[in-house]
Image (cartoon, grey):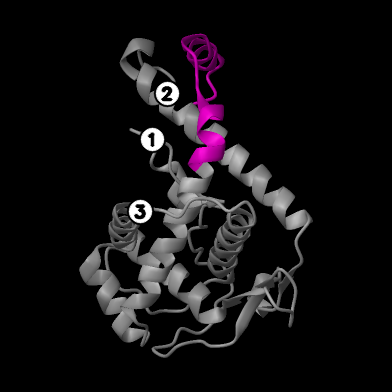
Amino acid sequence: MLPFVLGRLTPRLGMAVLLLALVAPSRAAAQVPGSRTRVEGIAAWVGGVGRTGASPILRSDVVLRARMRLGGQTGRVEMGPLPPALLRAALDELIGEVLIEREADRLRATRPSDAEVLEERARIDREAGGATVLNELLRRLAAAPEEIDAVARRRAYVDAFLRANLEGNTEITDTQVDRAFEAGDHPFVGRDLEAVREVLRAWLQQRLLARDVARWIEVLRSRTTVRVLAEWARDA
């Protein structure tokens, strides 16, 4: 799902995404070599192959996204081998973003403001472990800052589109909070309800938004040609 949508429920819903939350690397996972240079080539096509209007996803974009996630987890540049599971999750996230971007284009959605793009750009810095870590990662991968700017524009666009279409679906009433608390299917078991009511409400909103975004992506993917070429996108 889109990780950037879900972390922005207050004061508004956003695309913090949990498009598909990236999987933490496992020591037992098979590894693919890391590199200081760009990994070029096409990882996937969205919207067909070799046709006008098809959207390519570069392998280098997937590797960059995966290493940004690692930087956010560790607070430093990580240049070691990348587990295929992490690369697959990064690719799924990118495919989801492109699918929603194409749908927003089809419906002629409003483009985000400059302020919204700058907000998303700052959020990307934080998710990658900070501006210093991200800049060093870009240097070591021989990537340009403009690539991150382009990601920020797309994510801000997707975020605005999702909020416009899904935000009203995530209202959680007090009764729903009460029932969810009593059911115990939440991280706040053993706490006082009134002390965690608003936090639990936000948690329920996140889960509902994650479900709705995942369903939307599933529908878009079912009616859009998506061809995955990267070998690590397949389970061993």
Q: Amino acid at mark 1?
A: Arg
Is residue 181 found inside the magenta-colored segment of the image? yes
Query: Magenta part of the protein: which range?
Result: 163-186
Which percent across, then down, holds residue 42?
62, 82
**Residue 124 horizontal side relative to residue 166, left or right:** left
In this view, 159 is above or below 28: above
Q: Residue furthest bottom?
A: 37
The type of residue carrying mark 2 is Leu
Using the image, tell me which numbered label, if any, was put on residue 113: 3
Judging from the image, what secondary structure is the residue with disc 1 in?
Answer: loop
Q: Find numbered disc 3 in the image and state the secondary structure of the residue it sits on.
A: loop
| Residue 144 can be seen in this image | yes
Relative to 190, residue 133 above or below? below
Disc 1 target residue: 12
How far apart are the alpha carbons under marks 3 and 1?
16 Å
Task: Please indicate, yes or no, whether residue 17 appears anywhere in the rendered image.
Answer: no
Give the number of the mark in front: 2 or 3.
3
Question: Quadrant of residue 208 in the image?
Answer: top right
Q: Which residue is mark 2?
A: 200
Image-quadrant location for residue 145 = bottom left
Mark 2 and mark 3: Cα distance apart in space: 31 Å
Based on the picture, tell me whether residue 148 belongs to the magenta stretch: no
Q: Quadrant of the C terminus?
A: bottom right
**Mark 1, other Cα within 10 Å: few <14 / some 14–19 / many ≥20:** few
Main secondary structure type of the part rendered in magenta: helix
Q: Residues within 10 Å of mark 3 (few under 14, many from 20)?
A: few
Mark closer to the chain start, 2 or 1: 1
Is residue 26 positioned above or below 190 on the image? below
